Image (cartoon, helix red, strand yellow):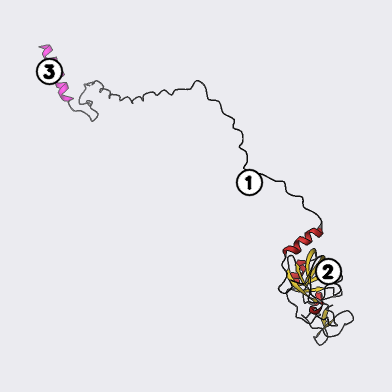
Amino acid sequence: MTKYLIGMGLVGSLIGCSNLNRSGEYRRESQHWIVLPPPPAAPSIAAPIAPSVSIPVPSAMPELVNLAPLPKPAHEETHQPEEINPDLAVLNEALGDVISPPAGCENWEKKVIDMNISGYCACPLCCGWARNAKGKPVYSAGPNKGKPKLVGFTASGQKAAVGTIAADAKLLPFGAKVHVNGYGYGTVQDRGEAIQGASLDLFFPSHEAAQKWGRKTLPVTVWLPPADAKTPAPGSKRR
């Protein structure tokens, strides 16, 4: 009887603790506790193992073959440059052959002369003139000092422009044609007291341009007009 009562009490305790919590364990409803066994472990999923691949290794590396350089084609053969003749006369002759004569001067006598070349414009500083008390331009120095001066006109009576050249009349007469590297073609139409011998003065439209040219020594190609084509020289000088 006693065993029976004890058994009934145990069953009552089980019934009183029949409520489960969310985790699957019994929660406390009375003074009795029921311990449940742990849930079974989740089955582990093993990652698939990649099959091993064996790479054959050669027993010995092949030897590198040293290739000899291919011969150059005949048209690619290098040649030593010819030695340049430093003689300036040879250079001047070559320049004279390259530069074409101006139209109408094909039969004129041609020369190549090394010349000292400067630049000028029509300003008072370059052409030696000033204004008198009445504001008129006059020569500021020389034998014509104080006499009226035509500003912008050459000693040959032509209006000065780019291409107007001043030269020594003893070397290059009026009407002679010249070619100056870096300036171009021009005609001798002017002269000046400071332009003597192998010298040229090139006309520029501004004093800044004339100063930028400065002074240079260059080979100049010259075409001399025949006697009947020379421009007669007037009596006055530019400066």
With respect to residue 129, does 223 lie above or below?
A: above
Q: Amino acid at mark 1?
A: His
For numbered disc 1, what is the local secondary structure? helix
Q: Which residues are magenta?
A: 1-17
The residue lying at 16 percent from left, 25 percent from top is 16
For numbered disc 2, what is the local secondary structure? strand
Query: Residue 234: x percent and y percent?
Result: 83, 82
Label drawn at residue 75: 1
Q: Residues within 10 Å of mark 2 (few under 14, many from 20)?
A: some
From the viewer's side, name the closer residue of 156 and 175.
175
Q: Is residue 12 magenta?
A: yes
- The answer, for residue 10, to whether it is visible in the render is yes
Of all residues shown, which one is farthest toward the right?
143
Query: Residue 46: x percent and y percent?
Result: 32, 24
Q: Amino acid at mark 3?
A: Met
The residue lying at 82 percent from left, 56 percent from top is 87
- The answer, for residue 205, to whether it is visible in the render is no
Label drawn at residue 199: 2
Label drawn at residue 8: 3
